[in-house]
Amino acid sequence: MFNPDQHHRRSIRLKGFDYSLDGGYCITICSHEKKCLFGRIEQDKMLLSELGKIVESEWLKSTKIRKEVILDEYVVMPNHFHAIVYFRRGLGRTPKTSRLDLTPKT
């Protein structure tokens, strides 16, 4: 369980930003202890391990089980995963300061 006195984590969230709004978000997920569990790089090419294939497969399933999600670019690296995801939960809920195009790339 998270204990702020023990874990000393700091939030990297933008103060005052409403993360429940529709829009684009950058996601990074690291493996436990940053171990290279998802594959390896050989000759400048990422070779996914079985776990890396699961990460990719589950990411791609996201739009099937979450209709409000639009996937954009992503990459599975040996010890982490980067992605850009858009949320479109409701009409009129996009940030007033943003002009996001929520049309999926083809």
Image (spheres, rainbow, N blue to C red):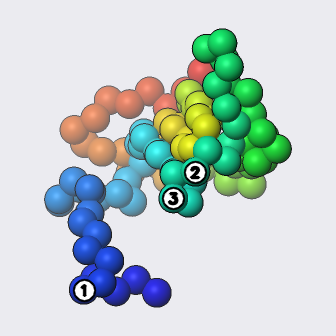
Which residue is found at the position 54% from the left and 44% from the top?
A: 80
Badge 1 amino acid: Asp
Residue 14: x and y in percent read 22, 54
Mark 1 closeness class: few <14, some 14–19, many ≥20 residues within 10 Å: few
Badge 2 amino acid: Lys
Of the pair 106 and 28, the residue shown nearer to us: 28
Badge 3 amino acid: Glu
Q: Is mark 2 on a helix, strand or loop?
A: loop
Which residue is found at the position 43% from the left and 41% from the top?
A: 26
Which residue is found at the position 67% from the left and 53% from the top?
A: 66
Q: Which mark is residue 35?
A: 2
Of the pair 20 and 37, the residue shown nearer to us: 37
For the C terminus, the quadrant is top right
Residue placed under numbered mark 1 in the picture: 5
Image height check: is 51 above or below 84?
A: below
- Contact, CB < 8 Å: mark 2 with mark 1? no
Residue placed under numbered mark 3 in the picture: 33
Residue 98: x and y in percent read 28, 35
Residue 30: x and y in percent read 51, 51
